[in-house]
């Protein structure tokens, strides 16, 4: 009888534990993809809903349904239907009353703090020593990102790394132009070497020294001495002691070269 009771308790405990685990997983699945936010306010204005926006902004509203921002969630039930345009642009009654026009709603392209209300981790990256000048109001989030369309990156369409490179190229034209001898890392995307928002290293590099290059270029061939680094058939151990691959005067054309296959200049 004791064995039966012990077994019953074990079965019950296991079942309760399993149910608790399943509940935790389901809870995570239903909350991770929904960001809770506090809606912006405009003095004297009230929320009118997305139906009022579609009359003028038809194409934008249609595309917005496929945008990640369309899944925002407000904790107050009375704002349950306000998870769209007014989540970022604020209550739109004044904008609607005058038939549109700027200055009567919050313009996300002119106020990066609106984005930082949700993207707090990105805000922290812009506070690092080296960063794109967004918090200095010299750039805006919408220069690189599309807040309305089905693809958050500009320009939309194509493979992710190709689109990202194309976006970087709008400003960094010298680094992204065509070269006779290209640095193959560019095929994998600029973010292989650079942080897109901010970094502790200059030029937004993911590593400050030759470790950045050795992630791809280090190959040990045969049994070598400790500390040997072979790139191709040449031991670069002594070269690396002189500094970074690009700062030591060896491979200064890090993005590509028209004259040097080894990207020396």
Image (cartoon, rainbow, N blue to C red):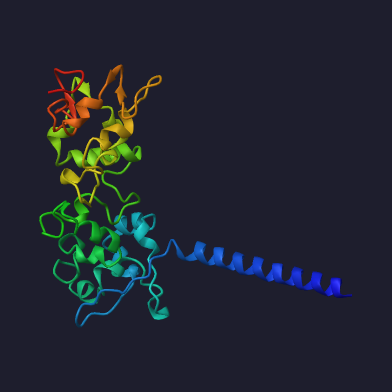
Quadrant location of residue 16? Answer: bottom right
Q: Residue 20, position in %: x, y? A: 61, 69
Residue at image point 66% right, 65% down: 18
Q: Is residue 53 left or right of residue 265?
A: right
Residue at image point 37% right, 77% down: 79
Q: Is residue 102 left or right of residue 207?
A: left
Q: Is residue 19 left or right of residue 142?
A: right
- Determine the residue located farthest toward the bottom in the rendered image: 44
Quadrant location of residue 121? Answer: bottom left
Quadrant location of residue 155? Answer: top left
The answer to whether 111 is drawn above or below residue 156 in the figure is below
Depth check: give the residue in front, 219 or 110. 219
The answer to whether 178 is drawn above or below residue 100 in the figure is above
- Quadrant containing the C terminus is top left
Q: Residue 219, position in %: x, y? A: 35, 25
- Quadrant containing the N terminus is bottom right
Depth check: give the residue in front, 205 or 256. 205
| Whether residue 3 can be seen here | yes
The answer to whether 161 is drawn above or below residue 239 in the figure is below
Depth check: give the residue in front, 149 or 137. 137
Number of marks in the image? 0
Residue at image point 23% right, 80% down: 45
- Determine the residue located farthest toward the right in the rendered image: 1
| Whether residue 245 can be seen here | no
Depth check: give the residue in front, 203 or 85. 203
The answer to whether 206 is drawn above or below residue 45 in the figure is above
Q: Residue 188, position in %: x, y? A: 32, 34
Q: Residue 178, position in %: x, y? A: 18, 26
């Amino acid at each position: 009888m004791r064995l039966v009771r012990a077994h019953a308790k074990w079965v019950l405990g296991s079942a309760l534990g399993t149910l608790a685990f399943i509940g935790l997983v389901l809870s995570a699945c239903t909350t991770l993809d929904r960001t809770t936010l506090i809606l912006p306010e405009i003095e004297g204005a009230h929320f009118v809903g997305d139906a009022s926006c579609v009359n003028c902004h038809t194409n934008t509203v249609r595309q917005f349904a496929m945008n990640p921002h369309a899944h925002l969630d407000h904790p107050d039930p009375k704002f349950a239907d306000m998870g769209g345009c007014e989540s970022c642009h604020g209550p739109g009654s004044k904008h609607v009353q005058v038939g549109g026009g700027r200055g009567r709603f919050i313009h996300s392209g002119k106020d990066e703090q609106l984005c930082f209300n949700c993207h707090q981790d990105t805000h922290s990256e812009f506070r690092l020593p080296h960063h794109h000048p967004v918090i200095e109001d010299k750039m805006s989030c919408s220069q690189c990102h599309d807040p309305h369309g089905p693809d958050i990156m500009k320009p939309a369409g194509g493979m992710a790394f190709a689109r990202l490179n194309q976006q970087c190229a709008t400003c960094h034209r010298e680094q992204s132009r065509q070269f006779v001898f290209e640095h193959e890392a560019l095929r994998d995307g600029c973010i292989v070497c650079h942080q897109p928002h901010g970094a502790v290293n200059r030029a937004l590099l993911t590593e400050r020294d030759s470790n950045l290059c050795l992630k791809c270029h280090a190959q040990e061939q045969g049994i070598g001495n400790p500390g040997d680094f072979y790139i191709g058939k040449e031991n670069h151990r002594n070269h690396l002691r002189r500094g970074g691959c690009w700062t030591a005067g060896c491979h200064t054309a890090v993005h590509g070269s028209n004259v040097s296959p080894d990207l020396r200049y």
